[in-house]
Image (cartoon, grey):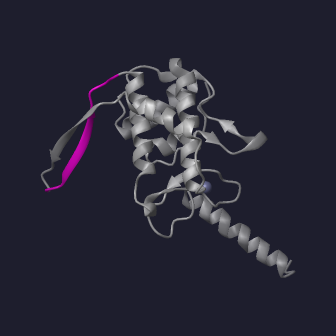
């Protein structure tokens, strides 16, 4: 099987990574969760990084994975565009989030760093999806400075969380393409060949 070139940014909350699995818009839209195999592959790539206890293939739960993805994408896009969401999507997200009771766990490293981790009590596919729903709630309720944004790169539709004040692109490569496009537009406008 060919391994698809998943649009994974790497340093984003897992809810944002999930939303980005529907890439582009209109006729050129690509669904990177189009098959159970691709869903399993995607979770094997992002699961461990985000502490998700993916024990078996979530691909068998494909309709629910895609339903949650579409829900998360709708809500994050609404926040990025400062639009009101479909209230049914808010209800759906809350329904997914009910599955994960968690307890906090203190981790005290030798260098003095103290971390609070949330440990899931529930396990299985529903718990994994619940964790992602909970992550989406955390992203949507973060301070405005860290609210979700849509990349302004040419032809890019990726969502990301603004983690520093000047960030405008999902990835530096989009910033590079954006600067190039503006450079060509300026040259074109000034008549320079
Ligand atoms: Zn981008």
Q: 193 or 103: nearer the eye? A: 103
Ligand 1's quadrant is: bottom right
Please check the rendered image and state whether residue 121 is part of the magenta-colored stretch, yes or no: yes
Q: 148 or 110: nearer the eye? A: 148
- Residue 138: image location, x then y, percent: 39, 47
Residue placed farthest to the front in the image? 87
Q: 62 or 6: nearer the eye? A: 62
- Residue 85: image location, x then y, percent: 58, 46
Residue 76 in view (yes/no): yes
Left or right: 191 as drawn, with respect to 96: right
- Residue 131: image quadrant is top left
Height in image: 126 above or below 45? above
* Residue at 50% from the left image edge and 70% from the top image edge: 166
- Residue 189: image location, x then y, percent: 83, 78
Q: Identify the image quadrant of the C terminus.
A: bottom right
* Residue at 60% from the left image edge and 57% from the top image edge: 151
Height in image: 175 above or below 81? below
- Residue 176: image quadrant is bottom right
Left or right: 131 as drawn, with respect to 9: left
Q: Identify the image quadrant of the N terminus.
A: top right
- Residue 91: image location, x then y, percent: 49, 35
* Residue at 51% from the left image edge and 29% from the top image edge: 41
Please check the rendered image and state whether residue 149 is part of the magenta-colored stretch, yes or no: no
Residue 11 in view (yes/no): no
- Residue 30: image quadrant is top right
* Residue at 12% from the left image edge and 52% from the top image edge: 110
Magenta segment, which residues? 112-123
Please tell me how many numbered marks the rendered image carries: 0
Height in image: 182 above or below 122? below
């Amino acid at each position: 099987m060919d391994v698809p070139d998943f649009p994974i940014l790497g340093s984003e909350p897992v809810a944002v990574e999930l939303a980005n699995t529907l890439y582009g818009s209109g006729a050129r839209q690509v669904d990177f969760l189009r098959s159970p195999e691709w869903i399993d592959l995607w979770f094997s790539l992002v699961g461990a990084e985000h502490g998700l206890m993916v024990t078996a293939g979530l691909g068998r739960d494909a309709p629910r994975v895609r339903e949650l993805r579409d829900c998360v994408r709708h809500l994050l896009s609404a926040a990025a565009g400062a639009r009101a969401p479909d209230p049914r999507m808010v209800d759906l997200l809350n329904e997914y989030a009910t599955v994960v009771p968690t307890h906090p766990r203190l981790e005290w490293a030798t260098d003095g760093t103290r971390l609070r981790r949330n440990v899931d009590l529930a396990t299985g596919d529903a718990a994994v999806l619940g964790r992602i729903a909970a992550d989406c709630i955390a992203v949507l309720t973060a301070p405005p400075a860290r609210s979700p944004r849509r990349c302004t790169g040419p032809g890019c539709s990726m969502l990301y969380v603004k983690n520093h004040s000047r960030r405008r692109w999902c990835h530096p490569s989009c910033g590079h393409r954006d600067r190039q496009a503006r450079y060509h537009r300026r040259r074109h406008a000034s008549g320079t060949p």
